[in-house]
Amino acid sequence: MDAEQGETCQDSRHFKHSLYQVGVGLAIMPVSLLPRRAQQHFKSAGQEFTRGVAKIARGFADELDEIGNAEK
């Protein structure tokens, strides 16, 4: 029974990963139709956006830490 559950869990993870890869592929498909230079600009813009979101999240977390430390 445990072996079957483990196999089912592994199959489920593989299926979810496959669905994720298909979604990413569909999302990126229009970008792949662009000229190489435009693709590079698009990739750079995406990286900058991700860095910006991470900075905002980090700043928010730091503020929450400060609030939590001030209450002690």
Image (cartoon, rainbow, N blue to C red):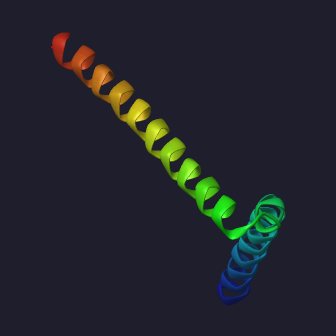
Position of 63 with respect to 10 (left or right) is left
Q: Nearer the viewer, residue 36 or 54?
A: 36
In the displayed image of the protein, which residue is found farthest to the bottom?
Answer: 3
Position of 18 with respect to 50 (left or right) is right
Q: Quarter holding the N terminus?
A: bottom right
Q: Is residue 43 above or below residue 21?
A: above
Q: Nearer the viewer, residue 5 or 68?
A: 68
> How many numbered discs, if any?
0
**Residue 61 image offset from top left, x and y in percent:** 35, 29
**Residue 58 image offset from top left, x and y in percent:** 35, 35
**Quarter of the image where one finds residue 39:** bottom right
Q: Is residue 31 above or below residue 21?
A: above
Q: Is residue 17 above or below residue 55?
A: below
Q: Residue at x 74, y 71 (%)?
A: 21
**Residue 70 image offset from top left, x and y in percent:** 17, 12
Q: Residue at x 51, y 46 (%)?
A: 50
Position of 53 with respect to 71 (left or right) is right
**Residue 27 image offset from top left, x and y in percent:** 79, 58
In the displayed image of the protein, which residue is found farthest to the top?
Answer: 71
Q: Quarter holding the C terminus?
A: top left
Q: Is residue 70 above or below residue 22?
A: above
Q: Residue at x 68, y 81 (%)?
A: 10
**Quarter of the image where one finds residue 5:** bottom right
Q: Nearer the viewer, residue 60 or 32?
A: 32
Q: Nearer the viewer, residue 58 or 32?
A: 32
